[in-house]
């Protein structure tokens, strides 16, 4: 089993990027330009390595290979993006790899690209790249190419050697478990061995409500793989496991007029196979709560009036302050019930909520986070 941290170090030992390896300080696929460039590099790496894995390391300074890390990247729908924009898409996996010297909120992103042995091309236009374009690695550059011959495999031996040097050993595993247990000792850390091979550690802050048992501030780490999943203080998840899998269901607490209920948002399932392989799959479960349209119109208009008071700097009474705490979630509920303009109102409210209090701004960010997950899926 490959130790991903060692793999990254071995890749960085090849100081110059090449036809099977690319490094980035960061990526941004929320913008069209960043998304297009990311797809171009994936296409080029896939075409340049038809018989072996190729890699992209994210969170590294280009000049000196200094590992500075990036924020957690929890977008498990990245394969959907690849499939949507690339013809003959490779299998792409993004993993968050912790390094001991980085702060707890920083990791190194490792993108593994496994080609399907066919030429990969852009399926449709994006940014300045045209549909049908084919890219290939030319040294450290991803360049457009015209193909009339079969792609030749030249990297399998060297990639095999790099991966072979990154194999796990028992000391790394034990050190990883002890390190996790010590760092998370205030949050009831636990570990479990799956399939006599995979060691999974997890911890979280427990919360019991009428709807069930939930955890926040959850850390999950596959010690063998140095792969880490993270859920913040605002997240509320339920955890279950058996001999074959470890399952996390994320919930959101939504409602109107202080009548809130927990709704399933997303399920993340880590499945362990008998052949020392594992998969991480994420599935959206969210079904928006539906409310009476007349009631929603009344509440929506009341929120609009409250927002106008906030924009003018008017004083708010106790009832209005209570309603203000519900404003982000209420606008989200209205939008999910097809009040399309409600999301514009929520975005308009952002600076005023931020200036009002940090707690209120956190509620705004939570509503936006839920919206992004639902829309992207």
Image: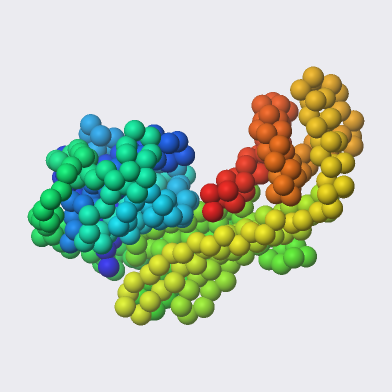
Q: Position of residue 354 (x, y in %)?
A: 67, 29
* Relative image position of residue 17 (x, y in whole percent): 19, 41
With 154 as the anchor, is 93 left or right in this view? right
User: Splitting the image into 4 quarters, where does residue 79 fall?
Assistant: bottom left
Question: Which residue occupies 66% across, 26% down?
Answer: 351
**Can residue 188 be seen in this snapshot?**
no
Quarter of the N terminus within the rendering: bottom left
49 relative to 33 in the view: left or right: left
Give the tally of numbered discs. Answer: 0
Give the image location of residue 214, x and y in percent: 66, 62
In the image, taking residue 95 as reference, residue 136 lies left or right, namely: left
Is the image coloured rainbow, by chain, by secondary structure, or in one colour? rainbow
**For the point 25% across and 34% down, which residue is it?**
62
Residue at the spot x=27%, y=43% of the render?
Answer: 133
Q: Kindly give the residue lying farthest to the top in the view shown.
A: 312
Q: Is residue 268 above or below residue 297?
A: below
Q: Is residue 340 above or below residue 77?
A: above
- Residue 343 quadrant: top right
**Residue 231 or 205: which is nearer the viewer?**
231
Quick one: 90 or 159, which is closer to the camera?
90
Closest to the observer, 159 or 202: 159
Q: Which of 186 and 353 is in front in this view?
A: 353
- Please provide percent x and percent y for residue 266: 58, 60
Residue drawn at x 71%, y 26% is 352
- Can residue 361 be seen in this snapshot? yes
């Amino acid at each position: 089993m490959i130790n991903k941290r060692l793999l990254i170090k071995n890749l960085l030992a090849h100081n110059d990027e090449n036809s099977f390896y690319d490094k980035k300080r960061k990526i941004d696929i929320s913008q069209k330009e960043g998304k297009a460039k990311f797809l171009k590099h994936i296409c080029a790496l896939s075409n340049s390595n038809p018989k072996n894995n190729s890699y992209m390391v994210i969170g590294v300074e280009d000049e000196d290979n200094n590992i500075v890390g990036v924020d957690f990247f929890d977008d498990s729908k990245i394969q959907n993006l690849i499939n949507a924009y690339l013809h003959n898409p490779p299998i792409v996996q993004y993993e968050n790899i912790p390094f001991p010297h980085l702060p707890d909120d920083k990791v190194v992103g490792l993108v593994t690209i496994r080609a399907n042995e066919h030429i990969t091309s852009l399926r449709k236009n994006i940014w300045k790249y045209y549909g049908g374009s084919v890219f290939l690695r030319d040294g450290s550059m991803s360049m457009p190419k015209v193909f009339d011959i079969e792609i030749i495999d030249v990297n399998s031996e060297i990639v095999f050697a790099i991966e072979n040097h990154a194999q796990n050993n028992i000391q790394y595993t034990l050190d990883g478990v002890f390190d996790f247990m010590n760092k998370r000792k205030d949050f009831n850390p636990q570990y479990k061995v799956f399939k006599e091979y995979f060691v999974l550690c997890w911890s979280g802050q427990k919360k019991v409500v009428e709807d069930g048992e939930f955890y926040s501030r959850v850390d999950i780490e596959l010690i063998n793989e140095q792969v880490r999943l993270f859920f913040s203080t605002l997240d509320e998840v339920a955890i279950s496991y058996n001999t074959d899998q470890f399952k996390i269901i994320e919930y959101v607490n939504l409602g109107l007029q202080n009548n809130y209920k927990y709704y399933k948002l997303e399920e993340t399932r880590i499945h362990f196979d008998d052949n020392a392989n594992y998969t991480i799959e994420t599935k959206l479960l969210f079904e928006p709560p539906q409310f009476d349209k007349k009631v929603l119109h009344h509440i929506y208009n009341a929120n609009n009036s409250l927002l106008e008071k906030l924009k003018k700097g008017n004083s708010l009474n106790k009832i209005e302050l209570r309603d203000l705490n519900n404003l982000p979630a209420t606008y989200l509920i209205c939008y999910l019930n097809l009040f399309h303009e409600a999301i514009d109102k929520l975005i308009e409210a952002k600076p005023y909520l931020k200036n009002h209090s940090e707690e209120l701004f956190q509620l705004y960010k939570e509503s936006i986070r839920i919206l992004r997950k639902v829309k992207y899926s």
